[in-house]
Amino acid sequence: MPHRPYAIDEMISAKAIAARVEALAKEITQAFAGTEKLVVVGLLRGSFVFIADLVREIDLPLEVDFLEASSYGDAMQSSREVRILKDLRGEISGRDVLVVEDIVDTGFTLHHVVNLLRSRAPKRLEVCALLDKPSRREVPIRATWTGFEIPDEFVVGYGIDFAQRDRNLPHIGKVRFTERAAG
Ligand code: PRP
């Protein structure tokens, strides 16, 4: 029995991700220099690996909070309805906030979350997304910082799942559906 009914081709190596995370963290550190305490908000579940690496490279006083939004469930297509499954623990009014997202695809998730958080009147709100698929965008939104722009491929790893699998891959891989899986 194969481990999974599809193949995964490496798209972005763990080493390339680490180098990009370090560069993003430097830019974020500079952009928020002088902050009293940055609130870094990870969007669950996909951002849990990225946020863990990113915060360890940011040289600022910060706290970490999480918000869980879901529009896909286990489906491959966005439902276009973003549900908040878990809200932040803390207040963000008057605070510097950095939202950390794994991937921006149609943009529905980020658009919904940014609108929700802006309604709470943060002092400043920026977004850092590891991956961006601009060709898939249905809602006009962009992250302040993007790790990598990628083509319209189904990707997994480094926190990103395929039906909840493969979040534990250390690199970003492209899913290739094999004949056996298709048949
Ligand atoms: C995925 C991903 C992003 C969102 C991007 O979340 O983590 O949050 O979809 O897609 P969009 O730009 O088309 O909205 P998902 O709903 O699969 O939940 P997960 O993070 O728990 O995997």
Image (tube, rainbow, N blue to C red):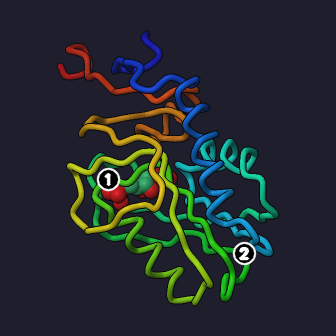
Quadrant where the C terminus is found in the figure = top left
- Residue at left 28%, top 22%? 176
**Residue 140 appears anywhere in the view:** yes
Q: Which residue is labeled 1 in the image?
A: 105
Mark 1–mark 2 contact, CB under 8 Å?
no
- Residue at left 64%, top 39%? 22
Q: Which residue is labeled 2 in the image?
A: 89
| Front position in the image: 70 or 2 | 70
SS label for mark 1? loop
| Front position in the image: 146 or 99 | 146
The amino acid sitting under disc 1 is: Asp
In the picture shown, does residue 94 fall above or below 48? Answer: below
Circle nearer the N terminus (1, 2): 2
Q: CA distance from mark 1 to mark 2?
A: 26 Å
- Residue 14 sits in which quadrant? top right
- Residue at left 48%, top 41%? 160
How crowded pointer 1 is (Cα within 10 Å; few <14, some 14-19, many 20+) is rated as some
Mark 1: C-beta under 8 Å from nearest atom of ligand 1: yes
Give coordinates of residue 16: x percent, y percent.
Answer: 53, 27
In the picture shown, does residue 106 fall above or below 56? Answer: below
Give coordinates of residue 167: x percent, y percent.
Answer: 54, 36
The amino acid sitting under disc 2 is: Arg
| Front position in the image: 122 or 68 | 122
Give coordinates of residue 180: x percent, y percent.
Answer: 24, 14
How crowded pointer 2 is (Cα within 10 Å; few <14, some 14-19, many 20+) is rated as few
- Residue at left 60%, top 70%? 86
**Residue 73 appears anywhere in the view:** no
In the picture shown, does residue 114 fall above or below 100? Answer: below
| Front position in the image: 134 or 109 | 134
Count up the numbered dots.
2
Can you tell which of label 1 and label 2 is closer to the viewer? 1
